[in-house]
Image (tube, coloured by chain):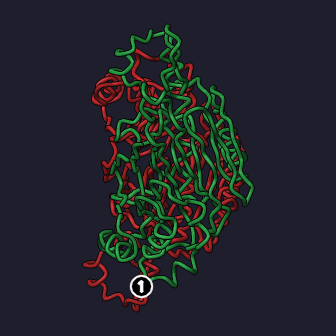
Chain colours: A red, B green
Amino acid sequence: MHLTVLGCYAATPRTLTNPTSQVLEINNHVVLIDCGEGTQVELRRHKIKFSRINHIFISHLHGDHFFGLPGFISTMRLLGRDKELHVYGPKGIKEAITLLLKLGDSWTNYPLLFHELTSKETELIFEDDKISVSTIPLDHRVYTNGYLFKEKLGKRKLNVAAVEKYGIDKAYYNNLKNGRDITLDNGSIVPNKELTYDPPKPKSYAFCSDTIYDESLADKVKEVDVLYHESTFLDSEAHLAAKTKHATAKQAAQVAKDANVKTLVLGHYSTRYKSIVLFKEEASTVFPNVLLADDGKTFDF
Amino acid sequence: MHLTVLGCYAATPRTLTNPTSQVLEINNHVVLIDCGEGTQVELRRHKIKFSRINHIFISHLHGDHFFGLPGFISTMRLLGRDKELHVYGPKGIKEAITLLLKLGDSWTNYPLLFHELTSKETELIFEDDKISVSTIPLDHRVYTNGYLFKEKLGKRKLNVAAVEKYGIDKAYYNNLKNGRDITLDNGSIVPNKELTYDPPKPKSYAFCSDTIYDESLADKVKEVDVLYHESTFLDSEAHLAAKTKHATAKQAAQVAKDANVKTLVLGHYSTRYKSIVLFKEEASTVFPNVLLADDGKTFDF
């Protein structure tokens, strides 16, 4: 699982900081999460091919999470895309993008498919044999969802030495990977466990931004490998966090602790602070394994 | 008259090139012309105060001239603007911006006034005692206007030595600047011309992008001081220019020549070419005084 943070600062694009956008590579899928202004330039800067992205997940329709999307969709057309592009986001996103493309008389010549969200309950919104994606309803000033990305359990891995020892023909390898036992020519059965290894444990990534501190969130992101939780403010500005429906670093860490996640990644920093290291210091007083997102930073999980 | 080119490349924002946006400072007005994605970041980079901009002129609703506007308008709110902001552009611009702000539940708390354009004839759309702004109807794939900015003739300048020689009281200075003659205490009349100098000749700037080559355009920009004319292509791609309703450097120069302008500024380059110097070379075969726009370049006229 590989995460590239294209932007992770709150409010407005600036010369040195970008609004929210991330690329998550998970089990051969490349998904874009949020798309603030400047996202397409950051994708180019990080040499991420636009054509690899087939799914875009937008948390909410504030500009700093969304105003890069019309341009990104338009650029896909100029690049000659012909594959489907799926956009998940709050109801209204289709009307907005459709209107902008209509005004420019520049509708896409690839299939652009919107999946509009309205539910306040968790929903499974995408699933194939590689991953599943569910919403994480969040509490912000407008209708907002986080997203929970989960790898599917892969096939079992062949124990090559054991397989060769029993002289098992290649024709049976697929059965083995699917967990079947093998009956040898002499009628004896070799249990699958002797011939294969467990597949790698599936990983999970929860993206939660923007949101007020919400105790009940911990249940929804229980034991994920990585929790990205916004921390717009420090505890000294907790009153501003409450007022604007954002969270503090300490609150993000409390969610991580209550959910017993492996790693907490902080982001969506207000630019009022001199150093983002302050966020890590604060969160670390509550939860041990804290990482700081920053524009251009990549993570392997 | 001072021009800052924030972006002058066609189609999409890239790591090293920005789509169209310019800031024109003319007779104490600071206006923004077009607003491609990334405009607000470029304004910050060039240290142009957002609060100085009260008028925005959008040529047409293709993304590379317009997709930075929702973010710019939103950022103005976050910066605490309370002054009126006037947006001029094709019909539909109000619906688009209004929808985006409504979806984000983040309407401006300053007066945002739209002036939607539909006419295919030249219109005077703004005028005060400093400048006038008229549309220049252009022929592109969607409804498009260029804009003609003209300084108003200023007041006459005092000839301080002459005024002191006649011992004229300060109370009369305003009359002098307004062109009045002076009657001295002895009854004799001093003609205004002896006491003042002509005001500086008013300057004019015509912004013409995007447009196909149009012979009749020369009449509309006759003898302007500066003509910014798009040159998306070189003559070798004249067939593409015709097909996409853009112009070549040679065609832009022909308009400049026919209109007898003082200076031609080229821009809106396709990124297919290795060097923009090629555009100047081509245009200079037709018209002598050619300048090249480039991102971040400033001009004093």
Q: Where is residue B170 in the image (x, y as percent from the top left)?
A: 45, 10
Residue drawn where x is 44% and y is 71% of the image: B253
Left or right of residue A125, residue A2 in this image:
left
- In front: A265, or B236? B236
Left or right of residue A41, residue A72 in this image:
right
- In front: B278, or A16? B278
User: Which residue type carries mark 1?
Assistant: Ser
- The tally of labels here is 1
Residue drawn where x is 52% and y is 85% of the image: B239
B211 relative to B184, above or below: below
Circle 1: element type: helix
Q: Where is residue A267 in the image (x, y as percent from the top left)?
A: 40, 37
Residue B219 seen in the current view: yes
Residue drawn where x is 68% and y is 36% of the image: B113
Residue drawn where x is 36% and y is 53% of the image: A4
Q: Where is residue B79 in the image (x, y as percent from the top left)?
A: 50, 27
Quadrant including the N terminus of chain A: bottom left
Tell me which chain the residue with mark 1 is part of: B
**Residue B129, located in which quarter of the rendered image?**
top right
- Using a 10 Å C-alpha cutoff, classify the residue at mark 1 as few (fewer than 14 neighbours), some (14 to 19) or many (20 or more): few
Q: Where is residue B58 in the image (x, y as percent from the top left)?
A: 59, 51
Residue topped by disc 1: B236
A60 relative to A69, above or below: above
**Residue B85, located in which quarter of the rendered image?**
top right
- In front: A4, or B34? B34
Residue A147 seen in the current view: no
- In front: A272, or B213? B213
